[in-house]
Image (cartoon, rainbow, N blue to C red):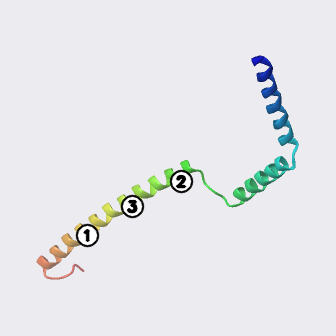
Amino acid sequence: MMNNRTQWMEDLQKNLSDLIARSPAADLERNARAMMTQTFTRLDLVTREEFEVQTDLLARARMRVDQLGEQVQQLQARLDALEAKGGGSPS
C-alpha cells in the first residue's frame, strides 16, 4: 500500500513538472531571463568580488594620499622654518 502511494506521489510530481515545463509560464520565465541577461550585459555591471577589490584599492589609495599630504605639510613647515631663519626666500 505504501509503495503504491509513493509511486502515485512520484507520478503526480513528474506530471506536474512536465506540465509546468510545457506551460506558457515556462516560456515567459525563459524569455524574461534572456531579456534580463541582455539588459545586465549592456549595463556593464561588475561582480561583487570585483567591487570589493576596487573598494579595497580605493581605501589603500586614500590612506596613501593622506600620508603623502602629511609629508607635504611637514616638508612645508620645515621649509617655512628654514626661510624664517634665513630671513627670506631662497632665490
Quadrant (top left, top right, bottom left, bottom right) of the N terminus: top right
Say which label, 2 or 3, has the lower sequence index.
Answer: 2
Residue behind mark 3: 62
Residue behind mark 2: 51
Name the foreground residue: 26 vs 35: 26
Give the residue at x 39% y 61%: 62
Q: Is residue 82 above or below residue 27?
A: below
Give the residue at x 45% y 53%: 56
Circle 1 SS class: helix
Mark 2 nearby-residue class (10 Å; few <14, some 14–19, many ≥20): few
What is the total number of numbered labels drawn onto the structure image? 3
Name the foreground residue: 65 vs 83: 65
The amino acid type of the residue labelled 2 equals: Phe
Outermost residue toward the bottom in this view: 88
How far apart are labels 2 and 3 at the CA level?
A: 16 Å
Q: Is 39 on the left-hand or right-hand side of 65?
A: right
Residue 89 in the image: x percent, y percent?
A: 21, 81
Give the residue at x 22% y 78%: 90
Residue behind mark 1: 73
Outermost residue toward the left in this view: 85
Mark 1 nearby-residue class (10 Å; few <14, some 14–19, many ≥20): few
The amino acid type of the residue labelled 3 equals: Arg
